[in-house]
Image (cartoon, rainbow, N blue to C red):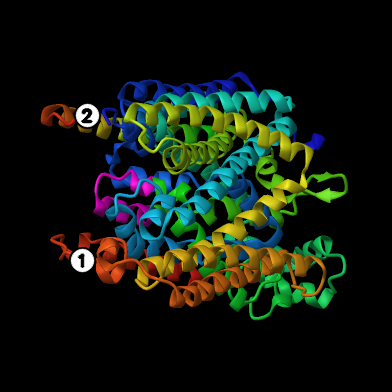
Amino acid sequence: MGLDIRLPIGLMFCVLGPILLISGIANGESLSTQTGAAMLAFGAFMLTFGVRGQLRAGRTGDG
Amino acid sequence: MMQELHVQLTSVDWAVVAVYFAFVLGIGFVLRRYMKSSEDFLESGRSLPSWITGLAFLSANLGALEVMGMAGNGYKYGMLTAHYYWVGAIPAMIFVAIFMMPFYYGSRARSVPEYLKLRFDEKTRGLNALSFAVLTVLMSGINMFAMAVVFKVMLGWDFEVSVVISAAVVLGYTYLGGLTSSIYNEVLQFFLIVFGFAPLAIVSVAKAGGWSGIEARLAEIGPGLLQAQTPSLSAADAAAQVSGFTHIWSSVGSAHSNPMGIEVIGLVMGLGFVLSFGYWCTDFLVVQRALAAKDMASAQRTPLIAAVPKMLFPFLVIIPGVAAAALALPMPVEDGVTRYDFTLPLLLKEFYPAGMLGLGLSALLASFMSGMAGNVTAFNTVWTYDIYQAYFNKGASDQQLLRMGKQATFWGVVASIGAAYLVRNFSSLMDYMQLLFGFFNAPIFATFLLGMFWKRATPNGAFYGLASGISAGVIHHVIKTMGVITYASDAAAAFYGAIVSWSTCFFVTIAVSRFTMPRDDNELRGLVYSLTERPRSGVAWYARPSTFAIVVAIIALGLNIYFF
């Protein structure tokens, strides 16, 4: 359907993760820091696979 | 109104909520240019991979009642609530994947009611389509109402503000991007729900001293909690029931030996068979997600992929409720009634710092919205194909269907707003809705079971069986309300009501079918098990849906044994 869903998911988590990470570090809240880091890692993971998927779809003309 | 739940959001919390809204709407905006035909808009072009449809299959079911209700039940009944997952969902999800999906997907039916039309006739489709359309819009309204209540209690928002915002966002992305947008957002919302609630589960269990700490605390304070819920409960009975908090099977030998008031037969037959199969195997809200898959194998894998996170969801929503009970967190009380359904918001307020609170609220919003959008997209499809095209414009062109699909989306959301106001003014309507769903969902599974696996089932048999099953459910409820028959709990009454309803439909369908004309075998090919060729799968054994189903069943069995 043109849009690889992993891209918006990855992007959203790459935006939300740092917000929580920075807020956690600034306020000394380990829960926010750890959750933010986990979300950032997940976002990066999804984004990587989303970009790869989109490039592959572009090459095969599926996109 | 429950001031103890009021929270003050910081700018970080608002930023998290704003980012969530931006992405949800952005997905609809990007997808709008791909909506060129009714198939694109209402069926997602049957183009999606199974991991997407699988997560959407689960997420569409994660409405307000699911997430908030299950956490509340975790506090009230403990791990017994996990029966709604490990008995009340997983077996049915395996069954629909392996045995029913080949007929749904293979028949090219665009909806569940349309399968009924192909297998039986127009009147059975009409009955199913009309009841489904009405109930779906009402359920969407209930989600909207529940969300508005949560945000009024937690943020002090006006009811109108919550309803308008949620309706506008859901309308925005479903109108722009149709079913694909709804499904894509359900996947995004699924991950947000997991990341929003998983830290809460970890923190609440840790605060209660881990699982062993929870068991020890509940052994000590559990009887007191149970007596607070049911003042008439004796100390001895309360002590006997307390194992239900942490074990799921050892206390269901009798309805009086567990806090839910359920026993094995009602549990297995009522919940595990009739209600569960009635929902997961026939409700178009979830089946629609599988029908959007790109091929038959993906459609079959859809419920199986959904089953994996589904069986882990008790750890996300029930166990925090159990931990809250172990910590003896005082539940909010409104008009003298303890509001267990506010367990999750209470835990969010108790354990989440700034930022995380925004994430938790976004996760709550995501669960409400995925439930609402799921209902709206199922409604617009049934309305367009099974009511508009079937009764008002048989020769409708594809562009007319696309236009009607979009209009149905708009009016579905408007009707949901109306339903939310109805529920607000008639609070008992919410209970009646659950009841109504039971009346319709329980017998319909008998209709499908006979329709798919017994070629002799006739159109008249199906229609009169279904009508009798619905009537039997209503009569059972009336008799129960009059006090002629009594049950240990409302849950037990619902389970046995479903059994009565299903059995009536099953036997009346068989009886009427015996005396009426079946359809010709040639018309039923691809619709009935015995008349459908099953091509040999060229897929390796480990990649087959049946292998996946066995793995899912083993994990579910393991969970049942661990928490026995």
Side (left or right) of B510 relative to B214: left
Instruction: Characterize the local packing of mark 2: few (<14), some (14-19) or many (20 or more) Cα atoms within 10 angstroms.
Output: many
For the residues carrying marks 2 and 1, which lies nearer the camera in this image?
1
Query: Is B291 inside the magenta-drawn segment?
Result: yes
Whether residue A25 is visible: no
The numbered disc on residue B534 is: 1
Side (left or right) of B175 relative to A50: right
| Residue at x-position 63% and y-position 24% | B164
Calculate the distance from the C-alpha at mark 2 to the C-alpha at mark 1: 35 Å
Residue sticking out furthest to the bottom: B253
Q: Secondary structure at mark 1?
A: loop
Instruction: Characterize the local packing of mark 1: few (<14), some (14-19) or many (20 or more) Cα atoms within 10 angstroms.
Output: few
Q: Secondary structure at mark 2?
A: helix
B324 to B83, vertically: above or below: above
- What's the residue type where badge 1 is placed? Arg
Q: Quadrant of the C terminus of chain B?
A: bottom right
Whether residue B117 is visible: yes
Q: Are marks 2 and 1 on the same chain?
A: no
Between B22 and B525, the one nearer to me in the picture = B525
Question: What chain letter is assigned to the residue under label 1?
Answer: B
Q: Position of residue B252 (x, y in %)?
A: 64, 76
Q: Quadrant of the N terminus of chain B?
A: top right
The numbered disc on residue A54 is: 2
Query: What residue span does the magenta drawing correspond to?
Result: B289-305
Name the image quarter holding residue B228.
bottom right
